[in-house]
Image (cartoon, coloured by chain):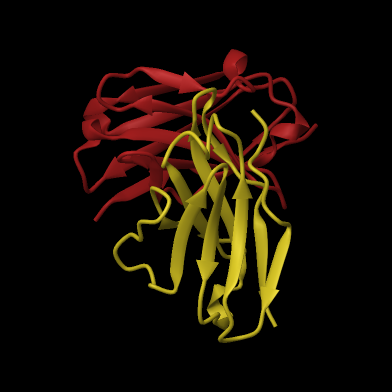
Amino acid sequence: QSALTQPASVSGSPGQSITISCTGTSTDVGGYNYVSWYQQHPGKIPKLIISDVSNRPSGVSNRFSGSKSGNTASLTISGLQAEDEADYYCSSYTSTTAYVFGTGTKVTVL
Amino acid sequence: QVQLVQSGAEVKRPGASVKLSCKASGYTFTTYNIHWVRQAPGQRLEWMGWISAGYGNTKYSQKFQDRFALTKDTSATTVYMELSSLTSEDTAVYYCARGGIPAMFDYWGQGALVAVSS
């Protein structure tokens, strides 16, 4: 099972919105509404920020939102803040190997 | 509060095996699966497998199928991961994570570094 494809890096200025894509296939992202997103600051553990494509767990800022179209899921961060600078990973349930993560995206706040 | 506490860092020689533990607390242990995810230095997260804490059935990534095993001790609310035939490519931080319902990793252990070096 190959990793889901994410852009290596995305950047934006404070207050702007950015979107990170996560592209898979019909056997993972396109086949199930089981895409989740994780934020990982350097040296820290991953944190769940979006589950089931677009659900935000309790305590997660409403500046984070998720969506999906076909085989591509997206994470949007609105009102970008310095604390959002981190690595972001998508994950999906798959019909082949159960779960797969994305390649990861480094978000830089300019 | 939900907590997953992992055992400590390990240094192993190539060809050896490593066994890590993940002790769960703060919820009904048998209700959720426990997953293992690893992250090599500077690399992405990689899913390895899960075990049902209730029934004990497992699902492993094909990449690790032949040398990876998950077990559990329900009375100790602990899951164990064993990886054998280690090579330098297995050097990574290994995380356990609770399998949220229906399909996410909602709580993570603190991670355990496994370094494989001769």
Residue A57 coordinates in the image, percent (x, y):
33, 59
Give residue B65's quadrant in the image.
top right
Using the image, determine if residue A4 lies above or below residue B17.
Answer: below
Residue B27 coordinates in the image, percent (x, y):
21, 44
Quarter holding the C terminus of chain B is top right
- Viewer-closest of A100 and B80: A100
Residue at 55% in and 74% down: A84
Using the image, determine if residue A87 lies above or below residue B72.
Answer: below
- Viewer-closest of A37 and A31: A31
Residue B42 coordinates in the image, percent (x, y):
72, 52
Q: Is residue B75 left or right of residue B16?
A: left
Q: How many marks?
A: 0
Residue A16 coordinates in the image, percent (x, y):
59, 82
Quarter holding the N terminus of chain B is bottom left
Residue at 31% in and 41% down: B24
Residue at 60% in and 19% down: B62
Using the image, determine if residue A42 lies above or below residue B53.
Answer: below
Q: Is residue A73 left or right of residue B2?
A: right
Q: Residue furthest right?
A: B118
Q: Residue furthest left?
A: B28
Give residue A85's quadrant in the image.
bottom right
Q: Chain B drawn in what color?
A: red
Residue at 55% in and 60% down: A40
Q: Is residue A101 left or right of residue A6?
A: left
Q: Chain A drawn in what color?
A: yellow
Q: Is residue A102 visible?
A: yes
- Viewer-closest of B118 and A82: A82
